[in-house]
């Protein structure tokens, strides 16, 4: 395990009977980097994230997170990482503050009240702290989900569509906040997203999956050049539709 690796996946595979959801996926995410995990619906992104979190046990392969083998030392890694997705709802009847306290205690965050107050100020949650989570707008829910994901000051963030359903202004605000947090803390980020402009802005490297396999990787600029396209969205469509690259292969 290289000392500067946030995630190392080796031959990561998940099968459900005759169906292979993830097929021999290998990659190393450096600490402090933001990488994109891309692919169409059914490509294996969510299954990959679940295995990285230790929620799913791989059929084959190994996952090491922040130096911890997830098969033997999962909880030591989980204390230092976090996950956020707008598709995972917080308990609707609990207020924002109550939800954040629950997660702060789950992560054994010292001085939880002070940490929640700090996040409330940074993420502009002050006016909604005592509002039930079920009464929040999409943008407010996203900011609360981000606060939940940051409550333990993670060294690794796994983000699944963090700006889905947000208006352009709120989406830009979230992206700027993530860029600033990574720059200030050195946190590594693995971002699963269907927003190619977001990926081009945030990610220094991209993993492209299709039918559970890694089919292309590189920086957004390198992939755009390799496929002879103008942007990453066209590259995504080429891969999704099995169109061959029009540019030159680049290392």
Image (cartoon, grey):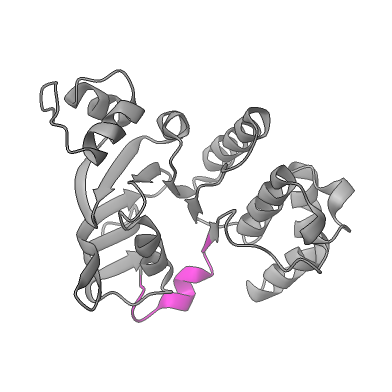
Relative to 60, does residue 235 appear above or below in the rendering?
above
Residue depicted at x 30% and y 54%: 43
Relative to 98, does residue 180 appear above or below in the rendering?
above
Q: Which range is magenta?
A: 69-82
Q: Is residue 127 left or right of residue 102?
A: right
Q: Is residue 36 left or right of residue 111?
A: left
Q: Can residue 66 be seen from the camera position used here?
A: no
Give the camera-side residue of 160 and 41: 41
Q: How many marks?
A: 0
Which quarter of the figure has residue 200? top left
Relative to 78, does residue 6 appear above or below in the rendering?
above
Residue depicted at x 70% and y 43%: 139
Which quarter of the figure has residue 61? bottom left
Residue 112 percent across, percent down from the top left? 76, 66
Residue 51 percent across, percent down from the top left? 36, 68
Q: Is residue 20 left or right of residue 5?
A: left
Give the camera-side residue of 68 and 196: 196
């Amino acid at each position: 395990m290289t000392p500067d690796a946030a995630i190392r996946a080796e031959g990561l595979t998940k099968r459900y009977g005759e169906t292979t959801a993830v097929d021999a996926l290998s990659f190393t995410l450096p600490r402090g980097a933001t990488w994109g995990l891309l692919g169409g619906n059914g490509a294996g992104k969510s299954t990959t994230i679940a295995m990285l979190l230790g929620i799913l046990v791989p059929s084959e392969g190994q996952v090491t997170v922040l130096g911890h083998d997830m098969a033997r030392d999962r909880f030591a890694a989980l204390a230092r990482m976090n996950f956020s997705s707008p598709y995972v709802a917080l308990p609707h009847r609990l207020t924002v503050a109550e939800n954040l306290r629950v997660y702060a205690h789950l992560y054994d965050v010292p001085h939880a009240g002070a940490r929640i107050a700090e996040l409330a100020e940074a993420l502009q949650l002050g006016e909604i702290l005592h509002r039930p989570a079920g009464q929040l707008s999409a943008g407010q829910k996203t900011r609360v989900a981000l606060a939940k994901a940051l409550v333990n000051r993670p060294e690794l963030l796994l983000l699944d569509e963090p700006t889905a359903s947000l208006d352009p202004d709120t989406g830009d605000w979230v992206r700027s906040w993530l860029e600033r947090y990574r720059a200030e803390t050195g946190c590594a980020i693995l971002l699963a997203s269907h927003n190619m402009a977001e990926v081009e802005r945030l990610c220094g490297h991209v993993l492209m999956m299709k039918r559970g396999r890694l089919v292309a990787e590189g920086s957004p600029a390198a992939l755009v050049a390799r496929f002879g396209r103008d942007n990453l969205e066209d590259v995504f469509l080429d891969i999704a539709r099995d169109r061959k690259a029009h540019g030159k292969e680049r290392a």
